Protein backbone atom coordinates (compact mmCIF):
# COMPACT_ATOMS: atom_id res chain seq x y z
CA UNK A 1 0.00 0.00 0.00
CA UNK A 2 1.55 3.25 -1.12
CA UNK A 3 0.65 6.54 0.55
CA UNK A 4 0.92 9.76 -1.42
CA UNK A 5 1.36 11.65 1.83
CA UNK A 6 4.00 11.62 4.48
CA UNK A 7 2.34 9.91 7.48
CA UNK A 8 3.26 10.84 10.99
CA UNK A 9 3.97 8.80 14.06
CA UNK A 10 3.19 10.97 17.02
CA UNK A 11 6.08 10.76 19.43
CA UNK A 12 5.04 11.68 22.97
CA UNK A 13 7.54 14.05 24.58
CA UNK A 14 7.80 14.02 28.36
CA UNK A 15 6.42 17.01 30.26
CA UNK A 16 9.92 17.75 31.63
CA UNK A 17 11.40 17.88 28.14
CA UNK A 18 8.61 20.13 26.85
CA UNK A 19 9.08 22.47 29.80
CA UNK A 20 12.85 22.53 29.25
CA UNK A 21 12.24 23.75 25.67
CA UNK A 22 9.93 26.48 26.97
CA UNK A 23 12.48 27.53 29.58
CA UNK A 24 15.12 27.82 26.84
CA UNK A 25 12.69 29.74 24.63
CA UNK A 26 11.92 32.35 27.31
CA UNK A 27 15.65 32.98 27.73
CA UNK A 28 16.35 33.05 23.96
CA UNK A 29 13.56 35.59 23.32
CA UNK A 30 15.18 37.88 25.88
CA UNK A 31 18.67 37.36 24.40
CA UNK A 32 17.43 37.98 20.83
CA UNK A 33 15.21 40.93 21.82
CA UNK A 34 17.26 43.50 19.83
CA UNK A 35 17.35 41.33 16.70
CA UNK A 36 13.60 40.63 16.90
CA UNK A 37 12.72 44.33 17.17
CA UNK A 38 15.14 45.20 14.33
CA UNK A 39 13.61 42.57 12.02
CA UNK A 40 10.12 43.81 12.93
CA UNK A 41 11.18 47.35 11.98
CA UNK A 42 11.84 46.10 8.41
CA UNK A 43 8.24 44.86 8.27
CA UNK A 44 6.87 48.11 9.73
CA UNK A 45 8.88 50.24 7.28
CA UNK A 46 7.33 48.34 4.37
CA UNK A 47 3.78 48.62 5.72
CA UNK A 48 1.17 51.36 5.24
CA UNK A 49 0.67 53.00 8.67
CA UNK A 50 -2.71 54.36 7.49
CA UNK A 51 -4.15 50.87 7.92
CA UNK A 52 -4.17 51.52 11.64
CA UNK A 53 -5.76 48.32 12.92
CA UNK A 54 -3.33 46.14 10.96
CA UNK A 55 -0.32 48.34 11.76
CA UNK A 56 -1.07 48.15 15.52
CA UNK A 57 -1.15 44.35 15.29
CA UNK A 58 2.19 44.26 13.45
CA UNK A 59 4.28 46.25 15.94
CA UNK A 60 6.81 44.39 18.10
CA UNK A 61 8.43 46.56 20.79
CA UNK A 62 9.96 45.80 24.20
CA UNK A 63 6.53 45.42 25.77
CA UNK A 64 5.47 42.93 23.06
CA UNK A 65 8.64 40.86 23.58
CA UNK A 66 7.93 40.89 27.33
CA UNK A 67 4.40 39.66 26.48
CA UNK A 68 5.83 36.82 24.37
CA UNK A 69 8.16 35.77 27.19
CA UNK A 70 5.31 35.88 29.68
CA UNK A 71 3.09 33.75 27.37
CA UNK A 72 5.86 31.13 27.17
CA UNK A 73 6.37 31.18 30.96
CA UNK A 74 2.63 30.95 31.57
CA UNK A 75 2.27 27.84 29.40
CA UNK A 76 5.42 26.38 31.02
CA UNK A 77 3.64 26.60 34.40
CA UNK A 78 0.39 24.99 33.19
CA UNK A 79 -0.29 21.26 33.64
CA UNK A 80 0.42 19.05 30.62
CA UNK A 81 -2.93 18.57 28.80
CA UNK A 82 -1.93 15.22 27.24
CA UNK A 83 -2.72 11.85 28.82
CA UNK A 84 -5.38 13.11 31.25
CA UNK A 85 -7.87 10.36 32.10
CA UNK A 86 -11.36 11.56 31.13
CA UNK A 87 -13.18 8.32 31.99
CA UNK A 88 -12.19 4.98 33.48
CA UNK A 89 -14.43 1.93 33.73
CA UNK A 90 -14.22 -1.86 33.86
CA UNK A 91 -17.07 -3.69 32.13
CA UNK A 92 -18.78 -6.92 33.24
CA UNK A 93 -16.79 -8.79 30.58
CA UNK A 94 -13.53 -7.69 32.24
CA UNK A 95 -12.50 -5.11 29.61
CA UNK A 96 -10.80 -2.14 31.24
CA UNK A 97 -11.54 1.01 29.22
CA UNK A 98 -9.91 4.40 29.68
CA UNK A 99 -10.59 7.52 27.65
CA UNK A 100 -7.57 9.84 27.70
CA UNK A 101 -6.63 13.16 26.12
CA UNK A 102 -4.35 12.81 23.09
CA UNK A 103 -2.48 15.16 20.73
CA UNK A 104 -4.08 16.29 17.47
CA UNK A 105 -0.93 15.58 15.47
CA UNK A 106 -0.18 18.39 13.05
CA UNK A 107 -1.97 21.74 13.24
CA UNK A 108 -1.85 24.43 10.55
CA UNK A 109 -2.68 27.96 11.64
CA UNK A 110 -3.18 30.74 9.08
CA UNK A 111 -3.04 34.29 10.43
CA UNK A 112 -2.21 37.88 9.49
CA UNK A 113 0.07 40.57 10.84
CA UNK A 114 0.41 39.68 14.55
CA UNK A 115 3.90 38.22 15.11
CA UNK A 116 2.99 37.34 18.72
CA UNK A 117 0.76 34.58 17.28
CA UNK A 118 4.00 32.91 16.11
CA UNK A 119 4.84 32.55 19.80
CA UNK A 120 1.40 31.97 21.31
CA UNK A 121 0.14 29.42 18.79
CA UNK A 122 3.41 27.49 18.77
CA UNK A 123 3.84 27.39 22.55
CA UNK A 124 0.33 25.96 22.98
CA UNK A 125 0.63 23.42 20.18
CA UNK A 126 4.04 22.26 21.38
CA UNK A 127 2.98 21.84 25.01
CA UNK A 128 -0.06 19.92 23.70
CA UNK A 129 2.42 17.65 21.87
CA UNK A 130 1.32 18.68 18.37
CA UNK A 131 3.48 19.82 15.49
CA UNK A 132 2.50 23.21 14.12
CA UNK A 133 2.78 24.84 10.71
CA UNK A 134 2.62 28.62 11.01
CA UNK A 135 1.34 30.43 7.93
CA UNK A 136 1.83 34.09 8.84
CA UNK A 137 1.06 36.98 6.51
CA UNK A 138 3.72 38.36 4.18
CA UNK A 139 3.53 41.71 5.99
CA UNK A 140 5.18 40.06 9.06
CA UNK A 141 7.67 37.91 7.15
CA UNK A 142 10.91 39.22 8.71
CA UNK A 143 9.45 39.17 12.24
CA UNK A 144 8.20 35.60 11.83
CA UNK A 145 11.47 34.28 10.37
CA UNK A 146 13.48 35.55 13.36
CA UNK A 147 10.91 34.13 15.81
CA UNK A 148 11.04 30.73 14.07
CA UNK A 149 14.84 30.90 14.41
CA UNK A 150 14.41 31.40 18.17
CA UNK A 151 12.09 28.37 18.37
CA UNK A 152 14.55 26.21 16.43
CA UNK A 153 17.36 27.22 18.79
CA UNK A 154 15.24 26.21 21.79
CA UNK A 155 14.31 22.85 20.22
CA UNK A 156 17.88 22.01 19.15
CA UNK A 157 19.28 22.99 22.55
CA UNK A 158 17.08 20.26 24.02
CA UNK A 159 17.87 17.60 21.42
CA UNK A 160 14.59 17.82 19.47
CA UNK A 161 14.05 18.12 15.72
CA UNK A 162 13.09 21.56 14.43
CA UNK A 163 10.09 20.17 12.52
CA UNK A 164 7.88 20.53 15.63
CA UNK A 165 7.50 24.23 14.81
CA UNK A 166 7.75 25.40 11.21
CA UNK A 167 6.98 28.61 9.40
CA UNK A 168 5.35 28.39 5.98
CA UNK A 169 6.46 31.28 3.79
CA UNK A 170 4.62 30.12 0.65
CA UNK A 171 2.91 32.79 -1.47
CA UNK A 172 -0.89 32.72 -1.57
CA UNK A 173 -1.24 30.54 -4.70
CA UNK A 174 1.11 27.87 -3.33
CA UNK A 175 -0.65 27.93 0.04
CA UNK A 176 -3.94 27.37 -1.77
CA UNK A 177 -2.41 24.47 -3.69
CA UNK A 178 -1.07 23.03 -0.41
CA UNK A 179 -4.55 23.20 1.16
CA UNK A 180 -6.10 21.43 -1.81
CA UNK A 181 -3.46 18.70 -1.79
CA UNK A 182 -1.26 18.76 1.34
CA UNK A 183 2.18 17.16 1.04
CA UNK A 184 1.84 15.89 4.60
CA UNK A 185 -1.01 14.86 6.87
CA UNK A 186 -2.81 17.74 8.59
CA UNK A 187 -5.11 17.05 11.53
CA UNK A 188 -6.55 20.50 12.22
CA UNK A 189 -6.56 23.84 10.40
CA UNK A 190 -7.24 27.10 12.22
CA UNK A 191 -7.82 30.03 9.85
CA UNK A 192 -7.66 33.36 11.69
CA UNK A 193 -8.72 35.98 9.20
CA UNK A 194 -11.47 37.41 7.05
CA UNK A 195 -14.52 35.72 5.56
CA UNK A 196 -12.75 35.01 2.25
CA UNK A 197 -9.89 33.13 3.88
CA UNK A 198 -12.26 31.12 6.08
CA UNK A 199 -14.57 30.09 3.25
CA UNK A 200 -11.58 29.15 1.05
CA UNK A 201 -10.13 26.94 3.79
CA UNK A 202 -13.51 25.33 4.53
CA UNK A 203 -14.00 24.56 0.85
CA UNK A 204 -10.59 22.97 0.26
CA UNK A 205 -9.44 21.50 3.58
CA UNK A 206 -9.19 17.72 3.84
CA UNK A 207 -9.34 17.75 7.67
CA UNK A 208 -11.34 19.47 10.43
CA UNK A 209 -11.31 23.28 10.35
CA UNK A 210 -11.75 25.32 13.52
CA UNK A 211 -12.97 28.77 12.63
CA UNK A 212 -11.63 31.70 14.60
CA UNK A 213 -14.62 33.84 13.82
CA UNK A 214 -15.14 37.44 13.01
CA UNK A 215 -16.32 39.77 15.71
CA UNK A 216 -19.26 42.06 14.85
CA UNK A 217 -20.19 42.20 18.51
CA UNK A 218 -23.42 43.68 19.90
CA UNK A 219 -24.39 45.44 23.12
CA UNK A 220 -28.06 45.80 24.12
CA UNK A 221 -29.12 48.55 26.52
CA UNK A 222 -32.17 47.21 28.36
CA UNK A 223 -34.84 49.53 29.82
CA UNK A 224 -33.43 48.78 33.31
CA UNK A 225 -29.79 49.56 32.52
CA UNK A 226 -27.56 51.63 34.80
CA UNK A 227 -26.80 54.48 32.39
CA UNK A 228 -23.41 55.55 33.81
CA UNK A 229 -22.12 51.98 33.78
CA UNK A 230 -23.48 51.59 30.26
CA UNK A 231 -21.53 54.58 28.96
CA UNK A 232 -18.29 53.30 30.55
CA UNK A 233 -18.75 49.78 29.17
CA UNK A 234 -19.58 51.04 25.65
CA UNK A 235 -16.56 53.35 25.55
CA UNK A 236 -14.24 50.60 26.70
CA UNK A 237 -15.66 47.96 24.36
CA UNK A 238 -15.58 50.31 21.36
CA UNK A 239 -12.37 52.33 21.78
CA UNK A 240 -9.95 50.31 23.94
CA UNK A 241 -8.54 48.30 21.01
CA UNK A 242 -10.25 48.64 17.66
CA UNK A 243 -8.07 45.97 16.00
CA UNK A 244 -9.37 43.24 18.35
CA UNK A 245 -12.05 40.74 17.32
CA UNK A 246 -13.73 41.36 20.70
CA UNK A 247 -14.26 45.10 20.07
CA UNK A 248 -17.84 46.39 20.00
CA UNK A 249 -19.53 47.22 16.68
CA UNK A 250 -23.28 47.60 17.23
CA UNK A 251 -25.30 49.19 20.05
CA UNK A 252 -29.03 48.54 20.43
CA UNK A 253 -30.99 50.83 22.76
CA UNK A 254 -34.40 49.91 24.13
CA UNK A 255 -36.87 52.71 23.40
CA UNK A 256 -38.49 52.03 26.81
CA UNK A 257 -35.35 53.25 28.60
CA UNK A 258 -36.26 56.30 30.75
CA UNK A 259 -35.22 59.60 29.04
CA UNK A 260 -34.45 57.52 25.97
CA UNK A 261 -34.11 60.45 23.52
CA UNK A 262 -31.69 62.49 25.65
CA UNK A 263 -29.65 59.37 26.38
CA UNK A 264 -29.27 58.47 22.70
CA UNK A 265 -28.00 61.97 21.93
CA UNK A 266 -25.69 61.90 24.95
CA UNK A 267 -24.22 58.53 23.95
CA UNK A 268 -23.64 59.62 20.34
CA UNK A 269 -21.99 62.87 21.48
CA UNK A 270 -19.66 61.00 23.84
CA UNK A 271 -18.77 58.50 21.10
CA UNK A 272 -17.98 61.30 18.63
CA UNK A 273 -15.87 63.12 21.23
CA UNK A 274 -13.86 59.88 21.57
CA UNK A 275 -13.30 59.88 17.78
CA UNK A 276 -15.96 57.30 16.87
CA UNK A 277 -18.01 57.78 13.69
CA UNK A 278 -21.66 57.15 14.57
CA UNK A 279 -23.88 55.34 12.06
CA UNK A 280 -27.58 55.22 12.89
CA UNK A 281 -30.82 53.48 12.02
CA UNK A 282 -33.72 55.74 10.93
CA UNK A 283 -35.01 56.26 14.51
CA UNK A 284 -31.65 57.35 15.90
CA UNK A 285 -30.92 59.47 12.81
CA UNK A 286 -34.14 61.44 13.51
CA UNK A 287 -33.02 62.16 17.08
CA UNK A 288 -29.43 63.00 16.19
CA UNK A 289 -28.83 64.89 12.96
CA UNK A 290 -25.02 64.53 13.26
CA UNK A 291 -25.21 60.75 12.85
CA UNK A 292 -24.93 59.06 9.46
CA UNK A 293 -27.89 56.90 8.41
CA UNK A 294 -27.14 53.26 7.57
CA UNK A 295 -28.19 52.88 3.93
CA UNK A 296 -27.11 49.30 3.27
CA UNK A 297 -28.08 46.17 5.22
CA UNK A 298 -24.55 44.77 4.64
CA UNK A 299 -23.30 47.27 7.24
CA UNK A 300 -25.19 45.27 9.88
CA UNK A 301 -23.14 42.15 9.09
CA UNK A 302 -19.82 44.02 9.01
CA UNK A 303 -17.03 43.77 11.57
CA UNK A 304 -15.62 47.32 11.53
CA UNK A 305 -12.12 47.04 13.10
CA UNK A 306 -12.31 50.84 13.00
CA UNK A 307 -13.50 53.81 15.06
CA UNK A 308 -17.10 53.48 13.99
CA UNK A 309 -20.25 52.06 15.50
CA UNK A 310 -23.91 51.58 14.65
CA UNK A 311 -26.41 52.92 17.21
CA UNK A 312 -29.97 51.68 16.70
CA UNK A 313 -33.33 51.34 18.46
CA UNK A 314 -35.22 48.21 19.46
CA UNK A 315 -38.64 48.03 21.08
CA UNK A 316 -38.10 44.96 23.29
CA UNK A 317 -35.71 42.32 24.58
CA UNK A 318 -37.13 39.85 22.02
CA UNK A 319 -36.44 42.29 19.19
CA UNK A 320 -32.83 42.74 20.45
CA UNK A 321 -32.25 38.95 20.61
CA UNK A 322 -33.66 38.46 17.10
CA UNK A 323 -31.52 41.28 15.65
CA UNK A 324 -28.30 40.05 17.28
CA UNK A 325 -28.82 36.42 16.24
CA UNK A 326 -29.48 37.54 12.66
CA UNK A 327 -26.45 39.80 12.16
CA UNK A 328 -23.71 39.07 14.71
CA UNK A 329 -20.61 36.98 14.08
CA UNK A 330 -21.46 34.69 17.00
CA UNK A 331 -18.50 36.00 18.99
CA UNK A 332 -19.54 38.20 21.97
CA UNK A 333 -22.77 39.92 23.03
CA UNK A 334 -23.59 42.04 26.10
CA UNK A 335 -26.78 43.06 27.85
CA UNK A 336 -26.69 46.08 30.15
CA UNK A 337 -29.44 45.60 32.76
CA UNK A 338 -30.10 45.35 36.47
CA UNK A 339 -32.95 42.90 35.79
CA UNK A 340 -31.43 39.42 36.23
CA UNK A 341 -34.40 37.57 34.73
CA UNK A 342 -34.15 39.47 31.46
CA UNK A 343 -30.37 39.08 31.52
CA UNK A 344 -30.79 35.30 31.92
CA UNK A 345 -33.20 35.15 28.97
CA UNK A 346 -30.81 37.22 26.82
CA UNK A 347 -27.79 35.10 27.77
CA UNK A 348 -29.60 31.81 27.15
CA UNK A 349 -31.10 32.79 23.80
CA UNK A 350 -28.21 34.70 22.21
CA UNK A 351 -26.18 32.43 19.92
CA UNK A 352 -22.66 33.70 20.72
CA UNK A 353 -19.49 32.08 22.08
CA UNK A 354 -19.52 34.53 25.01
CA UNK A 355 -22.50 36.35 26.50
CA UNK A 356 -22.17 39.10 29.11
CA UNK A 357 -24.29 40.93 31.64
CA UNK A 358 -23.01 44.43 32.50
CA UNK A 359 -19.45 44.00 31.20
CA UNK A 360 -17.33 44.87 28.17
CA UNK A 361 -16.96 42.41 25.27
CA UNK A 362 -13.21 43.06 25.45
CA UNK A 363 -12.91 40.23 28.01
CA UNK A 364 -13.41 37.51 25.38
CA UNK A 365 -9.75 36.63 25.38
CA UNK A 366 -7.79 33.67 26.75
CA UNK A 367 -5.68 35.71 29.16
CA UNK A 368 -8.55 37.92 30.35
CA UNK A 369 -10.78 34.88 30.95
CA UNK A 370 -8.11 33.01 32.87
CA UNK A 371 -7.55 30.36 30.16
CA UNK A 372 -3.99 31.57 29.54
CA UNK A 373 -2.49 32.04 26.08
CA UNK A 374 -4.95 31.20 23.29
CA UNK A 375 -4.60 29.76 19.82
CA UNK A 376 -7.79 31.44 18.62
CA UNK A 377 -11.32 32.38 19.67
CA UNK A 378 -13.56 29.79 18.12
CA UNK A 379 -17.07 30.68 16.96
CA UNK A 380 -17.63 27.09 15.82
CA UNK A 381 -19.63 24.71 18.00
CA UNK A 382 -17.38 21.69 17.41
CA UNK A 383 -15.12 20.91 19.09
CA UNK A 384 -14.87 23.92 21.34
CA UNK A 385 -16.33 27.42 21.44
CA UNK A 386 -14.67 30.59 22.76
CA UNK A 387 -10.98 31.09 23.63
CA UNK A 388 -9.04 27.99 22.61
CA UNK A 389 -6.41 27.48 25.29
CA UNK A 390 -4.05 24.66 26.18
CA UNK A 391 -6.70 22.30 27.59
CA UNK A 392 -8.80 22.58 24.43
CA UNK A 393 -5.90 21.82 22.10
CA UNK A 394 -6.16 18.06 22.50
CA UNK A 395 -8.44 15.37 21.18
CA UNK A 396 -9.17 12.07 22.92
CA UNK A 397 -8.50 8.39 22.49
CA UNK A 398 -9.83 5.16 24.01
CA UNK A 399 -7.38 2.73 25.60
CA UNK A 400 -8.97 -0.72 25.94
CA UNK A 401 -7.17 -3.41 27.99
CA UNK A 402 -8.34 -7.00 27.55
CA UNK A 403 -7.36 -10.58 28.19
CA UNK A 404 -8.52 -12.36 25.02
CA UNK A 405 -12.14 -11.13 25.07
CA UNK A 406 -14.09 -11.65 21.84
CA UNK A 407 -17.53 -10.34 20.93
Image (spheres, rainbow, N blue to C red):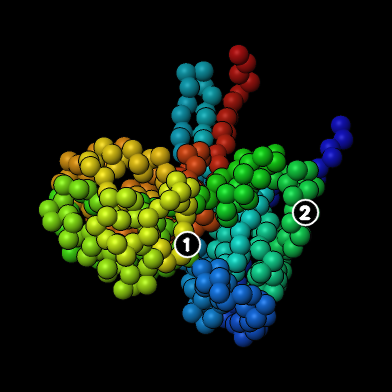
Label 2 neighbour load within 10 Å: few <14, some 14-19, many 20+? few
Q: Nearer the viewer, residue 155 or 168?
A: 168
Q: Is residue 198 left or right of residue 310?
A: right
First reached walking from the N terminus: tag 1 or tag 2: 2
Q: Which type of secondary structure does the marked residue at label 2 adopt?
A: helix
Residue 136 shows up from this direction = yes
Q: Quadrant of the C terminus?
A: top right
Q: How far across and down, in percent of the image, does residue 171 sit?
A: 76, 60
* Contact between labelled residues 2 and 1, with CB atoms less than 8 Å apart: no
Q: Residue at x 58, y 29 (%)?
A: 401
Q: Which mark is residue 173?
A: 2
Find residue 305 and name its label.
Answer: 1
Image coords of residue 175 (percent x, y) = 74, 53
Residue furthest to the left: 258
Q: How far from the left and from the top, in percent, is residue 398?
A: 56, 33
At 13% from the left and 56% from the top, the residue drawn is 259
Q: Image quadrant of residue 309?
A: bottom left
Q: Position of residue 326 (x, y in %)?
A: 40, 39
- CA separation, marks 1 and 2? 27 Å
Amino acid sequence: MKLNQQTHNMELISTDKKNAVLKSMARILDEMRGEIIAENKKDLDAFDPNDRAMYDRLIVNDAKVDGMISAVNQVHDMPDPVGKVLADRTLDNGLHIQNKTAPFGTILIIYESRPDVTIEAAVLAFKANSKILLKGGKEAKNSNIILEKAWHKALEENGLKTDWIRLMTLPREETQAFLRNPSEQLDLIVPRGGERLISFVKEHAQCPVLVSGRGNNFLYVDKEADWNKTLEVILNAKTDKISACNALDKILIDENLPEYKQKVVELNTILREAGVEVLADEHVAELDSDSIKVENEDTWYEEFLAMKSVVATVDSLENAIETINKYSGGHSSTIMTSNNDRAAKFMEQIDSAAVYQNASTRFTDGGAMGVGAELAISTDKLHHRGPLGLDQLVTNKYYVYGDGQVR
